[in-house]
Amino acid sequence: MFLSQFESMAHLVITPPSTNQTFQFFSSCSGAHLGNFRHITQEQRFLSVWHPKTPYSNCSELGRTKFRLCKSKYKTIQLANSRLRNQEHRRRKRWSRNLLVESKSSLSLDKVEEKEVIEGVGSDSYYDAIVIGSGIGGLVAATQLAVKGARVLVLEKYVIPGGSSGFYERDGYTFDVGSSVMFGFSDKGNLNLITQALEAVGCEMQVIPDPSTVHFHLPNNLSVQVHREYNNFIKEMISTFPHEKDGIIKFYSECWKSLEEPIYLFGQFFQKPLECLTLAYYLPQNAGDIARKFIKDPQLLSFIDAECFIVSTVNALQTPMINASMVLCDRHYGGINYPVGGVGGIAKSLAKGLVDKGSNILYKANVTNIILDHGKAVGVRLSDGRELFAKSIISNATRWDTFGKLLKGKDLPKEEENFQKVYVKAPSFLSIHLGVKAEVLPPDTDCHHFVLESDWKMLEEPYGSIFLSIPTVLDPSLAPEGRHILHIFTTSSIDDWKGLTLKEYEAKKERVADEIIGRLENKLFSGLKSSIVFKEVGTPKTHRRYLARDSGTYGPMPRKIPKGLLGMPFNTTAIDGLYCVGDSCFPGQGVIAVAFSGVMCAHRVAADIGLEKKSPVLDAALLRLLRWLRTLA
């Protein structure tokens, strides 16, 4: 029998402090040993308590220190100088509290710093999986595992979930942190992974179909609108490049062939491992190589480069065919569907579904280290000193952050050395969020635009091309009445923002943003500058800080022309018990890609911890084959 609430005074037995001292805590009535102060640093100690299976009673007051014991075998408990206030309210409240006790030369209860955490999340809890980060990949992995019966804890550094697919609110506006182009929301096919992930945890979101994916404004006055209907898009392409009719049809048909089969098979990775061998045909191919088999026109090839650049921040020759096909086909098959209320609703819904399935997500939980025990990942350490443990650790951080920071001081596994030889960190972005007067936009303005004014060579250069989303074209509720949101992206390196004083930094933000807005004013929206009523500018430093991504990077980028996805690592790592998920895992960047990575990761972890059946012999053979294929990159 456990005590649901044990509120009595206790006797604190203390000996002179030292670095390795343990302070013992005894019951005042029975003398039973209840817990210890474990020294963390010279300034901090935690109190954790073990309580027996029989209740204590008739405890007398021997001091002013009071504690509360909750329903669990182990629980971090609270110290305070006076009686708990408003006990009935605290009894109803869902939150439990971990309190950090500060001391210098001797134990003192004078200073207490409180931290709210979700009930049931304590340093003595043990999980099937801990997920570091709540990006879409991490949340999909977590929810898929929770559905399979796993007990999962997601740790998020920020105050809301979503990472690059999060949101923030200012002055009545709801801004998407990252892209507003949302794939994966259809009701058909194998790529509606967001729909499937939400349905798995009993969630559903209303969406607004986008009649077009993107409107390209390119050199030589080339204007191409990517229609939702595939036949309409092909007709427009043929009307623009009539001499390349056969090549256009063959190239985009090849995209369809290279998409559904490999994605489906990877979804069956652990159920049908032998069939996955057919992936060997698709993995080594790039979109640019295939395009050049059918197309000769340099401007059309440059257009395909721009199509791929939106996906991967590199040209078609460096974009794996599978990645390109995810976008070039699903935009017509499933279509672009914007979630009502903004992109941030996806992560919020997944987080809610995770909790509904009995697992937890903890915010303001900054993971600083992955704990290894004899080479196996067994837990994580937070910035406040707490340690949490699990059978498996899943990192939704980039591989540079995972192995360079969370495992700092550890030898880099050979597998990761090989990855970093093939891939480098892609540049970050300068992002500009604007609130503008609605009348500045012409009627029937498209939601998404890609602008490259004069020179194809500027496509991959910093600030060379501009991606613009206007989500209020689809969902006016995101902005005050009579206003629109403009979300502007352009590539930018963090090196371009180093060595500046705060004054220089702020001045540069304004100058660069003004130049970008001026280009859009000249190309698309006359009078744009004078219509601005709200402006927020984010640099690579901003993205590094809030998204916890090394250098604010968008993701991995091949050092040279890659052999398709051969060099892209899967979810497993060379460290037992440690898995990775997100855009630095197969199949790479993009909403569908990271969601797919999450599904794969959940299958892998579930199989490894015994929640899902697997064929050990075939499974091991296939993994060895895939690792060998990676060496060919």
Image (cartoon, helix red, strand yellow):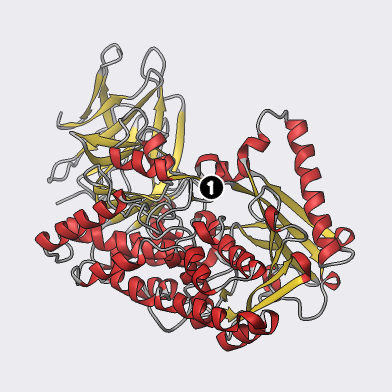
**Location of residue 404 in the rendering, given as x and y in whole percent from the top left corner:** 40, 35
Depth check, front residue: 321 or 384: 321
Q: Is residue 514 left or right of residue 316?
A: right
Expressed as whole percent of the image width and height from the top left, the position of residue 602 reads 29, 61
Q: Is residue 422 above or below residue 305?
A: above
The front one of 355 and 189 is 189
Name the residue at 23% across, 67% down.
Answer: 277
Residue 456, by quadrant, is: bottom right
Residue 213 position within the rendered picture, expressed as x and y whole percent measured from the top left:
61, 75
> Can the viewer see residue 569 in this picture?
yes
Image position, residue 432 (x, y; %)? 71, 54
Residue 76 visible in this rendered orientation of the protein: no
Could you tell me how many numbered marks the image carries? 1
> Helix, strand or loop at disc 1?
loop
Q: Residue at x 45, y 65 (%)?
A: 323
Examine the rendered structure and indicate whether residue 75 appears above or below residue 193: above
Residue extending farthest left: 617
Q: Is residue 280 left or right of residue 592?
A: left
| Left or right relative to 271: residue 573 | right
Residue 269 in the figure: left or right of residue 110: left
Q: Where 208 sits versus 391, above or below?
A: below
The amino acid beneath tag 1 is Ala
Q: Which residue is mark 1?
A: 426
In percent of the image, x 24 and y 59: which residue is there? Answer: 604
Task: Count residues near mark 1 (Cα–Cα under 10 Å), then give few for <14, some for 14-19, many for 20+.
Answer: many
Residue at the location (38% across, 71% down)?
Answer: 197
